[in-house]
Structure formats: C-alpha cells, structure tokens
Image (tube, rainbow, N blue to C red):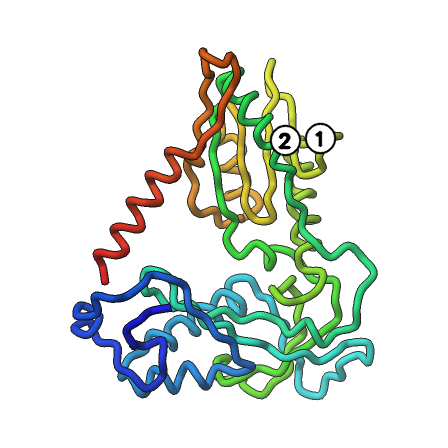
Amino acid sequence: MCETQDAFCPNVSTNDEKQTKSTKCQVSIWNTRSQNSSWAYEVDKLNGETKWTDSIETEVQLLYDTHECFRLVETGEKIPEEYHQIPLIWVFAVKFDGRRRARCVAGGHVTPNLTDDLYAGVVNFENVRIAFLAAELFDLDIIAADVSSAFIQAFTSEKVFVKAGPEFGKNEGRYMIVVRALYGLKPSGAMWHRKLAENLRDMRFRPSKADYDLWMRQHQDLWEYVAVIVDNLLVFSKEPPTIIEPLKKVYQYGLKGVGTPGADMTYDTEFKCWTMSVKTYVKKSVTEYRNCIRSF
C-alpha cells in the first residue's frame, strides 16, 4: 500500500500537488468492494473530483450498452420462479499508475451450487515451451494478446436477475435479467471457454490430443498454434494477422497488449540444448516500473 495518504482513503484530498510531494509511495494495487457504489460517490464528493464517478460510468456503459449484459424487465412482466435474485457487487481498485478502476461483478455466491464444469481452461506450460521451440525451429512468429472483457463475450447459463442501483441512471430500482456471463457467476469461466472454442473451431483449429487448450491447424506445409490461458492468447504462426484479425473483426473480440511476449529461446552450443528465458520481458517490465515511479 501507499505509505502516504491520498485518495485511497475517502477523507483525504488527492490533488496533483500533493501527489508530486509524496516521495515515499510504494507502487502497488489497492482495492475494496461494496454492494453499492455510494462509497465511490462519497469519495469523489469529499475530494472535489469525478475520478470514481467517471470509472463507474465507463463500466456501466461497457456492460449495459456495449455488451448488453442485462435485459430490463418490462412493467407488469413476471419473472419466472426458477430465476434467483442476486446482488451486484462493485470492486474498486487504484492501479499501479494511479488510474481508478471500477468493476461491476455478480454476487454469484448466493446462487445454488452447480455440478457442471465451471472453469476456463489453462494450457499446460510444458506444452507452451514445446510450442516456443517449434516456433524457433520452423521460424514462426509469436504474438501474445489479451481478450478484453472476455467472460461477457459469452452468454450465461444461469437464471438470475438483479436490481439496478443508482449507477444505472433512469433505470435505478428496475429489475434486470442477466444474459451475459458476468464475472462472479459460477459458470462464467466455462461459458467463455466454450465460446472461444466454438470460434477457434470455426477458424479450422482443433485442440491438440495432448492438451485441449493448445489449438492447432495446418496452414500450407506448416502447423499454426494458439495456446489459451483463460483470456490470454499466444499465437504461433508464419502470418499471425490471419489469426488475430478474424478474432477482432469477425468475432468482435477486443484484443489489447497485442505484441511479442518477451520470451527468449536460444540454443546453448556449450551444453547442446535449447534454453528459454524472460530477459526481454524483465527488461521491459523494469522500464515500465521506473516510468511509473517517476510519475509519482
């Protein structure tokens, strides 16, 4: 946590001048959660700013407008008995660079336990190393990407509804059916995993027999691979855009952090073996960390 007090606490101002004078700040992530957003509005009011309010509005727009995660219950409409009411929980975080992040998640802990598969898959990292070696041997490019708001790309299998809070503006107090796989719902990870699998199959990929989360397809005289780590992808291909672009344009995935993963694969002539390191990644991380420190 930060050794100097600032907007992380609701009763202390956080103007730029005070942040500039704060020289003992240890960079970290701070977060809290609440079943309503009133805490964040109170902090903004005390500090004379709108950072949390703006973050909440961005999250509501993402969930309600962009991804249409909810369906408003019409006046007089009866919600079926098999639907369970759940709370919406707000998670507030201060990122390492000072950005405010408000995330609205489902209170899935109050729903009945499920017997179905509930998790998103993760590729075995030994198989990732083998894929890196194959890329080196066959001169494949390696691209990493993070799927933004991954879970809500999929629809939920749970029958739940929520009551809109003040952050939903004119819809405050109305009931809403949850239609997307919100973070916090028990099967959301599995729903996302299923959707991504369907899309990869559409692109002619098939899961490896050794690892269901290492996908492969033949392209000309070579094989291409996609390794899946929940909502992070590693693409191994001679032409990565032929994989990345359909994910963005056809399946409407928002991909961020698209670029080389920073892992280094080299052949050790002395020991006659391949070695793998993260030297490039560490150098990049140290540079970003130093830049962040200078900003405080």
The amino acid beneath tag 2 is: Asn
In the rendered image, the vertical position of residue 274 relative to residue 111, given as above or below: above
In the rendered image, the vertical position of residue 193 relative to residue 212, given as above or below: below
Q: Badge 2: few (under 14), some or many (20 or more) residues near its Cα, within 10 Å? A: some
In the rendered image, the vertical position of residue 251 relative to residue 98, given as above or below: above
**Side of 210 relative to 258 (left or right):** right
| Placement of the N terminus among the 4 image quadrants | bottom left
Q: Which residue is mark 2?
A: 127
Nearest the viewer among 90 and 295 is 295
Nearest the viewer among 81 and 113 is 113
| Placement of the C terminus among the 4 image quadrants | bottom left
| Residue drawn where x is 49% and y is 85% of the image | 166
The amino acid beneath tag 1 is: Ser
**Side of 198 relative to 112 (left or right):** left
Secondary structure under badge 2?
Answer: helix
In whole angstroms, how far apart are the C-alphas of marks 1 and 2?
10 Å
Q: Badge 1: few (under 14), some or many (20 or more) residues near its Cα, within 10 Å? A: few
Nearest the viewer among 259 and 275 is 275
How many numbered marks are there?
Answer: 2
| Residue drawn where x is 44% and y is 36% of the image | 261
Q: Position of residue 285 (x, y in %)?
A: 35, 44
**Residue 208 tag number:** 1
Q: Where, by quadrant of the figure, is residue 283 drawn?
A: top left
Q: Where, by quadrant of the figure, is residue 114 drawn?
A: bottom right
Nearest the viewer among 111 and 18 is 18
Q: Position of residue 94 (x, y in %)?
A: 39, 68
Of badges 1 and 2, nearer the viewer stands 2
Q: Are marks 1 and 2 in contact (CB under 8 Å)?
A: yes
